Amino acid sequence: MCGIVGYIGERNAQEVLIKGLRRLEYRGYDSAGIATLDAGKKPKGNISLQVKKCKGKLSTLRSMLEKRPLRGKIGISHVRWATHGIPNTSNAHPHWDCSGKIALVHNGIIENYEQLKEELIRQGHLFRSQTDTEVIVHLIGRYYKGRLEEAVRKALKQVRGAYAIAVISKDEPDTLIGARSGSPLIAGTAQGEGFLASDIPALLDYTNEVFLIDDGQMVVLTRNSVKIIDVQSGEKVRKEKVKIQWDVAQAEKEGYPHFMLKEIHEQPKAIRDTLMGRISRRRDAVILQELAPLRKTLSCVNKIVIISCGTAWHAGLVGKYTIERLCRIPVEVDTSSEFRYRDPIIDKRTLVVAISQSGETADTLAGMREAKDKGAKIISICNVLGSSVTRESQAVLYTHAGPEIAVASTKAYTCQLIVLYLFALYLAQARKTLSGARLKQLIRELERLPHSAEKILKDKKVVLECARRYYKSFGFLYLGRALNFPTALEGALKIKEISYIHAEGYAGGEMKHGPIALINPHLPVVCVAPSSHVHDKMLSNIQEIKARKGIVISVASAGDELVPHHSNHVVYIPKVEEIFSPALTVIPLQLLAYYIAVKRDCDVDQPKNLAKSVTVE
Ligand code: AGP
């Protein structure tokens, strides 16, 4: 949560810092702030630290800056998702020390802040906010003896918890310092410029060459140099630059009213990109070079545990059905937050698969560490190059969804499914649990998915009609079975997240054990019922809902004549192999949630109380 940006160079810092924040706004949007060092109009004028911050979205800060812009060629900025202290102006970042010379922005949580704050107050420090963050800048102020780098290092040795910070000081106007431990931070460079940011899109306008700062490291940027050091020892660390392949256009809305709609429409391409290079030329084998170092482990794995959160957890559930069916290996799926505290039974023959779009989800990282301590090998499925999850895995299977900006995950989910399908086929091929002919058939079907997704996106008539009729509904019920039970969960999560309508996702077979009591003529029930081995069972569920006068919105396979007969509305998906159906059935549900949110005038891309990456527990 929270996004930070830092800049040093020859440009107008305010422009760079605000542009960067616009690309990070998905990380937090309850307050925003900026600080620059301004040398005034005279070439050798007195340098002053200028800070502007406010409660509310970045747009409020931008209006403030339009009226009274900040000058300066070095600065830091922040969008906040509150953890400690309510969203208001004094809790907004940047915070500054008692001397008013040093300013800092922070993403993370300082766990020992209360104890540090007490100590600092005893020493005479005056606090202006209720945040945990403010202790860091006071500590830096306390240790400052003419070298900012040294003071930051000393302060960081005192704090416990998670942080990514950016710091500037009026006394050292040619230095921008960043540091990380547990929260993401990248440093970028271009001719005569240095940048810091929580995520890649914030830098893409200026550079695609970045350094991925590791936990426990600090980066000291001047206009012409980058120095990375270990916080504990103070020693220099050698690090290679990484070239980012995403471009600016991918991080923009490109004419769509919301990122979410754009990202829903990007799914055919994202699926194609994720499949690219992973299927043999003769289309008879899956190639996952990334897993080569784990070949031995994979041959003797006797259990797979998938850990993830939210939407990624739903992808994991689809993974369980797929892997068990194709490879006959038992698979457990856990939300990372449960897994990390349940003392899971894991040993050297357990393979843990962590799924995360952002690669920065705190619970998933903690779950991975727990598994590693117990001797498991870890593979991750992730969308963000060099993110923390990828760095703590033995092998990474990247989803190539491109930047996902909307808080509600869409294309990252379908790409996670694609990687799980590839992984299951790869394992089946290695363990010979599928015949060559069947493998070939499945691979061909998999390659058809982008085209089928395109077809679904072309015809939104039924979804729009449902959104128009039911956007005022009090609640929604989503039902699915087997591989499409997770689809029901995902559909319900999407509508909850962005429309604030209560929704339940249930396994169809569980309906009689409780939720059937909810059915009434005003309750829309979304039934995910494509062709499958449980199609008849879903049909029975649908009939039971109709018998109780519920409203049935079904997702069915093209050519189905039974489901439409009992449904009020039907969205068709092209015929597809059962195991791949979740990659298609979810698309109408994403669209339904989106159009309902729009009708309800909700903030689709930045729903209240949520943040894109949950980097705190
Ligand atoms: C999805 O719409 C959600 N915003 C959320 O559940 C998300 O999937 C979850 O927080 C996990 O994030 P990650 O994939 O970045 O780890």
Image (cartoon, grey):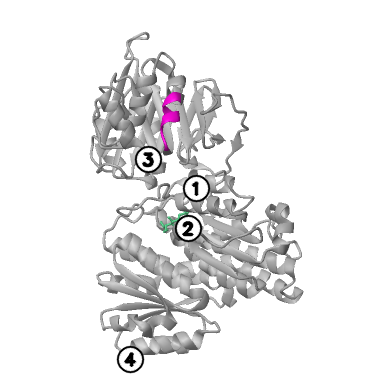
Marks 1 and 2: which is nearer the front? 2
Question: How far is disc 4 from disc 2 in space, using C-alphas?
Answer: 39 Å
| Residue type at numbered disc 2 | Ser
Residue 494 percent coordinates (x, y): 38, 64
Kindly tell me whether residue 53 is visible in this rendering: yes
Return the mark for residue 336. Answer: 2
In-image side of 568 versus 291 (left or right): left
Q: Is mark 4 within 8 Å of ligand 1?
A: no
Marks 3 and 4: which is nearer the front? 3
| Residue type at numbered disc 1 | Gln
- Disc 1 crowd, CA 10 A, few/some/many (<14, 14-19, 20+): some
At x 27%, y 83%, the residue is: 520
Return the mark for residue 250. Answer: 1
Residue 157 located within the stretch drawn in magenta: yes
- Disc 2 crowd, CA 10 A, few/some/many (<14, 14-19, 20+): many
Q: Earlier in the sequence, mark 4 or mark 2?
A: 2
| Residue type at numbered disc 4 | Ala
Q: Which of marks 1 and 3 is nearer the N terminus?
A: 3
Q: In this view, does 292 lie above or below 324?
A: above
At x 39%, y 53%, the residue is: 407
Q: Name the residue under label 4.
A: 547
Return the mark for residue 111. Answer: 3
Provide the residue span drawn in magenta.
Answer: 154-160
Quarter of the image for the N terminus: give it. top left
**Main SS of residues in magenta:** helix
